[in-house]
Amino acid sequence: MKVTVITISDRAARGIYEDLSGPAIEKILQDNLENIAVARIVVPDEKDEILKALRAAASSDFILTTGGTGLSARDITPEICREYCDRELPGIAEALRSESYKETPHALLSRGYAGMKDKTVIVNFPGSVKAVTLCTKILIPVMGHAIKMINNEGH
């Protein structure tokens, strides 16, 4: 399984803030899945940079983004991913928000999106380490099955 983690953060992209969420996702994936290759990219909250990163990761089975799902004017990750994707996967975003709400009511403010571009599943996670830890663990049980379905290998 090939996964690309894209951290979307102005501060991390400028080196002002250390990216902690991207490495956290990578560690959880590697600790819980076999035969996984994880690449990481850090970009600012800029439409062109986000699209460039999504296109660069197009051969991945999964693209997991972290950051840019909040309410500030610079939080544009869901809109860019929705525009980029061919199909929506609303159940993933609904489950992530629902399970995250059990931890904090602030999860209701996450605007994360999930969809597909060709055969790649794209999922938006919030930017905090706590949130990506929970969201990654929620997603892991369906990742292998999703790849089988995408490749017409049945249920």
Image (spheres, rainbow, N blue to C red):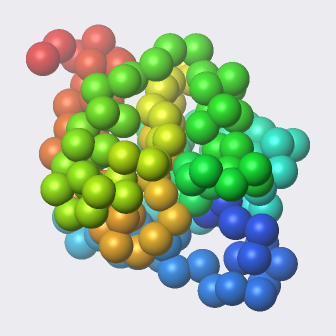
Location of residue 6 in the rendering, given as x and y in whole percent from the top left corner: 60, 57
Q: Residue at x 49, y 35 (%)?
A: 113
Residue 90 horizontal/vertical position (percent): 37, 24
Instruction: Determine the residue positioned at 83% across, 51% down.
Output: 46
Please say whether residue 53 is visible from this viewpoint.
no
Figure check: 155 above or below 127? above
Q: Is residue 123 left or right of residue 77?
A: left
Q: Foreground residue, 133 or 74?
A: 74
In which quadrant is the C terminus drawn?
A: top left
- Locate residue 91, reporting x and y percent: 29, 26
Q: Kindly indicate the quadrant of the structure image that contains residue 17.
A: bottom right
Q: Which residue does the image show at 60% across and 79% down from the upper left?
A: 19
Q: Nearer the viewer, residue 62 or 76?
A: 76
Q: Is residue 70 above or below residue 147?
A: below
State the image coordinates of residue 112 (x, y, percent, origin top left).
48, 42
Residue 21 in view (yes/no) = yes
Left or right: where 6 falls relative to 97: right
**Vertical placement of residue 105 versus 92, above or below:** below
- Considering every residue shown, the one lying at the far right of the view is 48
- Is the residue 72 above or below the residue 148 in the image? below
